[in-house]
Image (cartoon, helix red, strand yellow):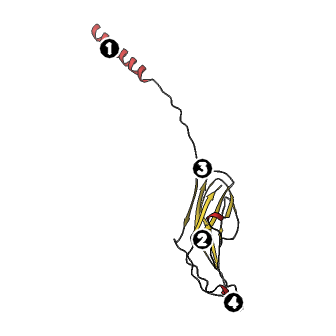
Amino acid sequence: MKKSILILSAAFMSLAIVQSASAQTATQAVSLTVSKVYRIAITGAATINMTVNAGVAGTDALTPVTDATTTYAITQNNSAATKVTANLDATMPKGHLKIALVSGLGTTAGTVDITSATSGSALNVVSGIAMGAEAGKSITYTFSANASEGLFVASKTVTLTVID
């Protein structure tokens, strides 16, 4: 019986030592950073077809056409100095293309003529954008031309950029 008690005591002591050894801790510093995040996405048809095909007799300006079938989403976490700019891949020698963006986080510039805006001369279309995200915001394009410009066909790429 003494032998059993001695073995049992040794087992409990071993268990206490093992538990004491497993209670060791270590620490590590973790550095956390959130960098600037600017994201913008356009939803809608890959190509929007706009055709001016009407006018008023005696007036050079033909009847403009609009398209509001496109929306955009934006996410930004930097500052209220953030804005969206718009530009074309190349200037338009004839006609005019205007763009208007709706925004709940910033101040819209209204309808902006981007006919001559290229990557080096992009124009502000929304400014003072607050940190956050929004989606489903309307983009409206307006295409106009004059009868004196004659017939023409053009294909343009519109670029929207989020910057501070």
Which one is nearer the viewer's eye here, 91 or 101?
A: 91
Q: CA distance from mark 3 to mark 1?
A: 63 Å
* Mark number displayed over residue 71: none
Label 3, secondary structure: give it.
loop
Which residue corresponds to mark 4? 56
Q: CA distance from mark 2 to mark 4?
A: 30 Å
Quarter assignment of residue 136: bottom right
Q: From what the image shows, is residue 31 above or below residue 85?
A: above
- Measuring 61% from the left and 64% from the top, which residue is drawn there? 119
Q: Position of residue 26 (x, y in %)?
A: 48, 27
Which residue corresponds to mark 2? 90
Decide: few, some or many residues near mark 2? Use Cα within 10 Å; few <14, some 14-19, many ≥20: some
Q: Amino acid at mark 2?
A: Ala
First in residue order: circle 4 vs circle 3: 3
- Measuring 60% from the left and 71% from the top, which residue is drawn there? 90
The nearer-to-camera label among 2 and 1 is: 2
Which one is nearer the viewer's eye here, 90 or 46?
A: 90
Quarter assignment of residue 104: bottom right
Q: CA distance from mark 3 to mark 2?
A: 29 Å
The nearer-to-camera label among 2 and 4 is: 2
Decide: few, some or many residues near mark 4? Use Cα within 10 Å; few <14, some 14-19, many ≥20: few
First in residue order: circle 1 vs circle 4: 1
CB within 8 Å, label 3 to label 1: no
Residue 120 visible in the current orientation? yes
Which residue corresponds to mark 1? 8
* Mark number displayed over residue 36: 3
